[in-house]
């Protein structure tokens, strides 16, 4: 169990360092779109692992991702 905890802690630290580095090189709008796709990838990996999501859960997730994308990409018309 201790090895698992240490491994997860190390993986978390490496991921956080990589994310901080990447945020310096990626524009803010693109970073937001990348972060908006996180639940999509989580849902796909969960489905591959055998998790089943209902229609309401998938619809809700799609609405959340769509709202983030619209707020970032659709709000530039007035500028």
Image (spheres, grey):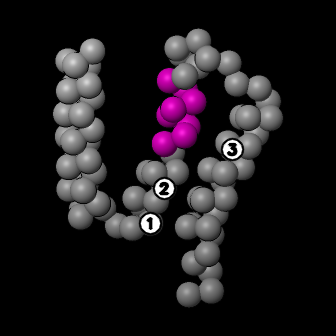
44 or 14, nearer to the observer:
14
Residue at position x 80%, y 35% in the image: 56
Q: Secondary structure at mark 3?
A: helix
Q: Secondary structure at mark 1?
A: helix
Mark 3 vs 2, N-terminal side: 2
Local packing at callout 1 (Cα closer than 10 Å; few below 14, some 14-19, many 20+) is few
Residue 34 rendering spot, x and y as whole percentages: 44, 51
Outermost residue, front direction?
A: 2
Q: CA distance from mark 3 to mark 1?
A: 19 Å
Which residue is disc 1 drawn over? 29
Asked if residue 30 is positioned above or below residue 60 in the image, the reply reads below
20 or 68, nearer to the observer:
20
Inspect the magenta stretch and tell me whether residue 55 lies in it. Answer: no
Q: In which quadrant is the C terminus drawn?
A: bottom right
For the stretch drawn in magenta, what is the main secondary structure? helix
Which residue is disc 2 drawn over? 33
Outermost residue, bottom direction?
A: 79
33 or 10, nearer to the observer:
10
Q: CA distance from mark 2 to mark 1?
A: 6 Å
Residue 7 rendering spot, x and y as whole percentages: 21, 25
Relative to residue 36, is residue 30 drawn left or right? left
Relative to residue 13, is residue 42 drawn left or right? right
The reply to whether the C-beta atoms of the residues labelled 3 and 1 are less than 8 Å apart is: no
Q: Secondary structure at mark 2?
A: helix
Which residue is disc 3 drawn over? 62
Residue 63 rendering spot, x and y as whole percentages: 72, 49
The reply to whether the C-beta atoms of the residues labelled 3 and 2 are less than 8 Å apart is: no
Q: Which residues are magenta?
A: 38-45
Asked if residue 61 is positioned above or below residue 74 in the image, the reply reads above
Mark 3 vs 1, N-terminal side: 1
Relative to residue 12, is residue 74 drawn left or right? right
């Amino acid at each position: 169990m201790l090895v698992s905890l240490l491994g997860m802690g190390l993986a978390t630290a490496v991921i956080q360092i990589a994310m901080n580095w990447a945020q310096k090189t990626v524009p803010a709008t693109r970073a937001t779109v990348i972060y908006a796709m996180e639940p999509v990838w989580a849902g796909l990996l969960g489905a591959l692992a055998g998790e089943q999501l209902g229609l309401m859960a998938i619809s809700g997730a799609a609405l959340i991702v769509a709202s983030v994308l619209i707020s970032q990409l659709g709000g530039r018309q007035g500028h």
